[in-house]
Image (spheres, rainbow, N blue to C red):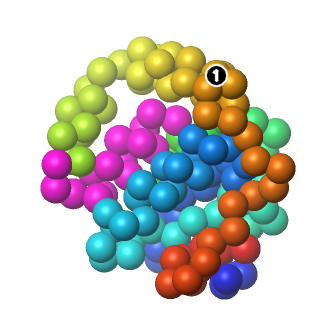
């Protein structure tokens, strides 16, 4: 795993102990044919540094965060941007950016608040293997 924080690559930060969040990463990896996205857990030193760099709360670990082109996207905005970046049929989520953010994030927060109960929790962060390992920043 590479410890450098890339300036020119999109980074997805996720809750490394959440099964739903890890499943989301497992969903993105094979659909990201161009290998546009790199990954780091919110709990990692890199994740904490990126959160601080973008003035995001480091104690609030219930959100997927996308850092891309100097911008940060959280919650539903991150999901929509990631889906758009994957292209193909996933771009169909793009029109949801016109739904008021407060409404989108209310749905996101409901899922986030219940993610451990519904999907479980790991004892430690997901450890990538194989060719995917190079896409994770430690």
Most prominent secondary structure in the magenta stretch? helix
Note whether 112 is above or below 67 in the view shown.
above
- Secondary structure beneath label 1: loop
Residue nearer the viewer, 90 or 128: 128
Q: Is residue 85 magenta?
A: yes
Quarter occupied by the C terminus: bottom right
Note whether 136 is above or below 63 in the view shown.
below
Q: Is residue 105 magenta?
A: no
Residue at image coords 35%, 41%:
80
Residue at image coords 24%, 39%:
94
How far from the left and from the top, in percent, is residue 107?
A: 47, 19
Residue 49 visible, this orientation: no
Quarter occupied by the N terminus: bottom right
How far from the left and from the top, in percent, is residue 18?
A: 68, 43
In the picture, measured across the screen, residue 32 lies left or right of residue 42, that is: left
Note whether 124 is above or below 2 in the view shown.
above
How far from the left and from the top, in percent, is residue 39?
A: 57, 65
Question: What residue would you read off at disc 1?
Answer: 114
Residue 126 visible, this orientation: yes
Residue 134: image quadrant is bottom right
Residue nearer the viewer, 69 or 75: 75
Q: What span is in magenta?
A: 75-89
**Image mark count:** 1
In the picture, measured across the screen, residue 45 lies left or right of residue 5, that is: right
How crowded pointer 1 is (Cα within 10 Å; few <14, some 14-19, many 20+) is rated as few
In the picture, measured across the screen, residue 138 lies left or right of residue 105, that is: right
Residue at image coords 42%, 55%:
27
Residue nearer the viewer, 70 or 94: 94
How far from the left and from the top, in percent, is residue 118?
A: 61, 26
Residue at image coords 30%, 58%:
85
């Amino acid at each position: 795993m590479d410890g450098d924080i890339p300036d020119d690559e999109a980074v997805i930060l996720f809750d490394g102990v959440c099964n739903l969040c890890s499943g989301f990463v497992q969903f993105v990896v094979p659909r990201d044919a161009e290998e546009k996205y790199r990954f780091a857990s919110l709990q990692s030193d890199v994740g904490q540094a990126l959160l601080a760099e973008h003035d995001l709360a480091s104690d609030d670990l219930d959100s997927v965060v996308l850092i891309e082109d100097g911008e940060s996207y959280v919650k539903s905005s991150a999901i929509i941007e990631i889906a758009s970046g994957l292209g193909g049929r996933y771009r169909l989520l793009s029109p949801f950016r016109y739904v008021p953010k407060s409404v989108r994030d209310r749905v996101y927060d409901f899922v986030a608040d219940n993610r451990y109960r519904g999907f479980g929790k790991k004892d430690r962060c997901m450890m990538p293997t194989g060719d995917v390992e190079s896409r994770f920043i430690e």
